[in-house]
Amino acid sequence: MSAAAATALQSSLCISSQKPSSSPGNSQQPNSLSAAKPKSLLHKHPLYSSTHQNLSLQIKEKILCLEIMGIDSGKALSLNPSLHTTSLHSIHSIMSFLQSKGIHQKDFPRIFGMCPKILTSNVKADLNPVFSFLSQDLHVPENNYRKVINKCPRLLTSSVRDRLKPALFYLQRLGFKDLGALAYQDPVLLVSSVEHTLIPKLKFLESIGFSTNEAKSMVLRCPGLFTFSIENNYKPKFEYFNEEMKGELEELKEFPQFFAFSLEKRIKPRHIEVMQSGVKLGLANMLRSTDEEFKELLREGGNR
């Protein structure tokens, strides 16, 4: 289906099908689809008749609206049960609002697919404050809203008061000065819980031997450290580094990006090759180099 056709169907779906009829005979059962008169272009769509016959007209239209936008309707309805009862007019209002903020229709599949909760948001109470936060607190110009939202759609489902502002305040206290970097490169940090995500990651680094200032320095150099799982990332990698590689904390302090590499696909195999070759190779050269560069380093006998 062309983009123009999809737009026409969405528009017809979200507007015309919501107009209540003043006819007293409009109380027919929604499951009597054969007797229902088409209310929108969507009813004529080939997918319409293939949806389950026992679904109400409104649910069928919502499913098709999502599918036409390129969204997995089953996943969206499962992740956001409120979609079952929200009005089509409300969905249309959210789409229109986001487009007024510079979000393109072609962005909707990814944004709504990742965060279907947005489809049942309140424009005034939930969405508008996020854009005000982007403008006033992060100094993001209107023409860059799209770039930031596409980078992290979860911003639209995050409370400004309870999540975004506390995270920004905490990160600034740690030493994050570049608002542009937070907005365009690491906005995921802003949607993270200070209490349950950011502080525990810093505390873990301290628990393995780093001072508070050293831990802060590491996350400032590698903000991705705040996004890694303690159980699935930090612990197994540090255990391997400490017990198998016999590494020193100073190495991790100098190269905190160590935790960003795959343990099974990069760290272990390269460490084994280094051990077998007898060459002394620093963490950065061992992990950051391409396959060809890595082999060349081994042939040359180590660090250049």
Image (tube, rainbow, N blue to C red):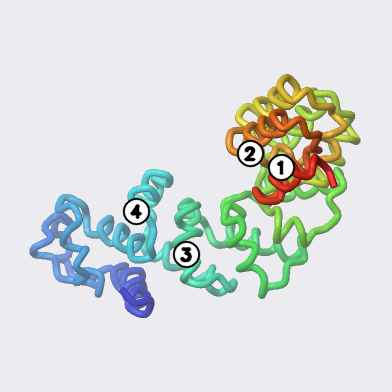
Q: Position of residue 96 (x, y in %)?
A: 49, 71
The residue that mark 2 highlights is 266
Which disc is residue 210 wearing? none
| Residue at 46% over, 53% down | 116
Tell me the kind of residue under disc 3.
Answer: Phe
Using the image as rendered, state which of residue 26 and residue 12 is in the foreground: 12
**In front of the other: label 1 or label 4?**
1
Quarter of the image that includes the N terminus: bottom left
- In this figure, which residue is indicated by the disc labeled 4? 73
Identify the residue under disc 3: 108
Q: Earlier in the sequence, mark 4 or mark 3?
A: 4
Earlier residue among tags 2 and 4 = 4
Q: Earlier in the sequence, mark 3 or mark 1?
A: 3
Q: CA distance from mark 2 to mark 1?
A: 7 Å
Q: Nearer the viewer, mark 3 or mark 1?
A: 1
Q: Residue at x 87, y 32 (%)?
A: 250
- Indicate the secondary structure of the residue bearing disc 4: helix
Q: Are marks 2 and 4 in contact (CB under 8 Å)?
A: no
Helix, strand or loop status at disc 1:
helix
Three-letter amino acid code of the residue under disc 4: Ser
Q: Earlier in the sequence, mark 2 or mark 1?
A: 2
- Which element carries disc 2, helix, strand or loop? helix
* Quarter where residue 6 is shown: bottom left
Q: Where residue 226 appears, x then y in whole percent? A: 72, 40
> 240 or 47: nearer the eye?
240
Label number found at residue 287: 1
Displayed quadrant of residue 133: bottom right
Q: Quadrant location of residue 35?
A: bottom left
Query: Of the residues tagged 2 and 4, which is closer to the observer?
Result: 2
* Residue type for callout 1: Leu
Q: Are marks 2 and 1 in contact (CB under 8 Å)?
A: yes
